[in-house]
Image: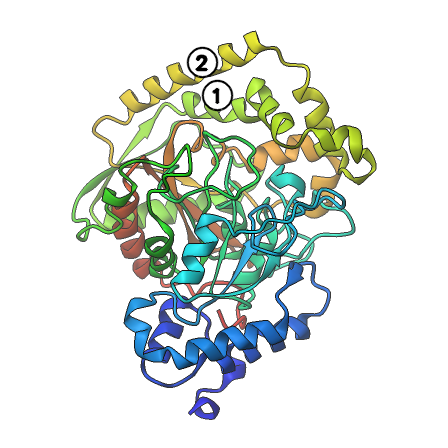
């Protein structure tokens, strides 16, 4: 039956592929062969750091084929996926994009193992901004992976390979990391969904941390239901993870259709000189209003200040605690921007750290009060497309502009769902983010599903078989 399906045109969209498996239209071995063919056809595209051994991958697919009777107990049955290279996969080096840093884990990160246990097929480790420090995708040594719409536009980071792999139709989903936007920016730049769950809902054990309080493992997928299919499989309380939420198993991951809701937008919208994104955002707001939303504005200054704490306060010193030894041992292997951040991280004192923590507590309290009576905050995910040449010319300034709407989510203990919203007149994608209180993941799914249906925008780049 696989010949009739047309594997070259096979959609790897998780829900679509799952339905094809259940209908007996395709089997995991054929899917693996097609994935390997697509990866080979793209050549040295800088998406992958290392791929799984093809023989072993086919062996795993054959084992799944023999377990087809168990498909109802394997929610991710036969879905190919990739993992950002700061997340551990057993018996494969975790490099964080830094030659010589390699750590060789004997066990996979909890989220990765849960995906495998649910029947997913691991394809390989994906590229990133070095040590997940950056939002643009160009902080790499030896070149970066390319935006699926325009190679002269940043792919978004730091989970660059993870976002591009999904948008290019190479995998059904990817697991990345998100401190200040890395699970959402690549989604927006490549026209797919990026799901940042509530911190502690998905175990982060096995992740090379930038900040234990802010970090989480997000999901990149082709659509809302695809992303939540994965989230349902990997979310769970982990007694060995110090930041795992004790109520992780009780947080609802779905909700009834949203009939009426109140949504806020920032009182200070910033487009950094762009003239096309504002109209796309206005259309998205009209779409939300048509779904029953009541629009209001919110003071965005606490969000911006909280976001600035990631790089402009003693919170950055935690990066030095996690992997700062590379500055002494492997200075030649560091991207200049990463090296500069690690040097600056060492300048903070314990007093600075306490001041930053106290200020964050104040900002969380203040923003939570502002959200009273508001169901969701809606922002652009990224203000505008940023070109590679301008990013390289002013990496610090431009990177901060990329994170204008994303940095504050982690520090303020929020969750977020990044959604495609439009293709701009220049053909580049524009996305919005639904940002909610911790634990509102299921409610975001419901509204996101309705927004996605109303938008009716195919994921990824045109012709990517996403």
Labelled pair 1, 2 in contact (Cβ < 8 Å): yes
- Left or right placement of residue 99 versus residue 282 in this view: right
- Percent coordinates x, y for residue 448 in the rendering: 31, 51
| Residue ID at (56%, 72%) | 57
The colour scheme used to paint the residues is rainbow
Q: Residues within 10 Å of mark 2 (few under 14, many from 20)?
A: some
Number of dots carrying numbers: 2
Q: Is residue 183 above or below residue 41?
A: above
Q: Which residue is mark 2?
A: 359
Q: Secondary structure at mark 1?
A: helix
Q: Is residue 174 above or below residue 436?
A: below
- Percent coordinates x, y for residue 374 in the rendering: 24, 32
- Left or right placement of residue 145 versus residue 18 in this view: right
Numbered tag placed on residue 305 in the rendering: 1
Q: Secondary structure at mark 2?
A: helix
Q: CA distance from mark 1 to mark 2?
A: 9 Å
Q: Earlier in the sequence, mark 1 or mark 2?
A: 1
């Amino acid at each position: 039956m696989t010949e009739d399906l047309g594997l070259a045109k096979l959609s790897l969209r998780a829900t679509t592929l799952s339905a094809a498996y259940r209908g007996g239209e395709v089997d995991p071995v054929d899917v693996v062969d097609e994935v390997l063919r697509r990866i080979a056809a793209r050549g040295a595209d800088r998406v992958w750091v290392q791929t799984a051994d093809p023989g072993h991958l086919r062996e795993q697919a054959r084992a799944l084929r023999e377990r087809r009777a168990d498909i109802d107990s394997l929610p991710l049955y036969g879905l190919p996926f990739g993992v950002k290279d700061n997340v551990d996969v057993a018996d494969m080096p975790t490099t964080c994009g830094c030659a010589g840093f390699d750590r060789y884990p004997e066990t996979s990160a909890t989220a990765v193992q849960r995906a495998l246990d649910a029947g997913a097929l691991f394809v390989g480790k994906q590229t990133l901004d070095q040590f997940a420090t950056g939002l643009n995708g160009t902080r790499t040594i030896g070149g970066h992976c390319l935006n699926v719409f325009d190679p002269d536009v940043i792919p978004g980071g730091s989970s660059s390979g993870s976002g591009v792999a999904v948008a290019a139709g190479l995998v059904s989903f990817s697991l990345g990391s998100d401190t200040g936007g890395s699970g959402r920016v690549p989604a927006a730049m490549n026209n797919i969904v990026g799901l940042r769950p509530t911190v502690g809902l998905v175990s982060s054990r096995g992740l090379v941390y930038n900040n234990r309080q802010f970090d989480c493992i997000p999901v990149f997928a082709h659509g809302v239901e695809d992303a939540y299919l994965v989230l349902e499989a990997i979310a769970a309380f982990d007694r060995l993870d110090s930041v795992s939420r004790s109520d992780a198993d009780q947080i609802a991951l779905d909700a009834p259709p949203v009939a009426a809701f109140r949504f806020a937008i920032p009182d200070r919208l910033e487009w950094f000189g762009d003239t096309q994104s504002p109209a796309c955002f206005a259309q998205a707001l009209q779409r939300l209003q048509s779904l029953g939303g009541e629009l209001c504005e919110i003071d965005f200054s606490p969000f911006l200040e909280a976001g600035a704490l990631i790089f402009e306060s003693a919170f950055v010193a935690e990066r030095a605690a996690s992997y700062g030894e590379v500055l002494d041992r492997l200075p030649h292997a560091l991207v200049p921007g990463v090296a500069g951040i690690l040097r600056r991280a060492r300048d903070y004192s314990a007093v600075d750290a306490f001041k930053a923590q106290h200020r964050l507590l104040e900002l969380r309290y203040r923003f939570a009060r502002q959200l009273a009576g508001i169901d969701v905050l809606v922002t652009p995910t990224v203000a505008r497309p940023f070109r590679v040449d301008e990013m390289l010319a002013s990496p610090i300034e431009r990177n901060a502009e990329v994170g204008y709407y994303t940095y504050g989510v982690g520090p303020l203990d929020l969750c977020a769902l990044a959604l495609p919203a439009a293709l701009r007149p220049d053909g580049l994608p524009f996305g919005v983010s639904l940002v909610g209180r911790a634990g509102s993941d299921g409610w975001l799914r419901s509204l996101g599903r309705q927004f996605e249906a109303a938008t009716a925008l195919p994921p990824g780049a045109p012709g990517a078989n996403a």
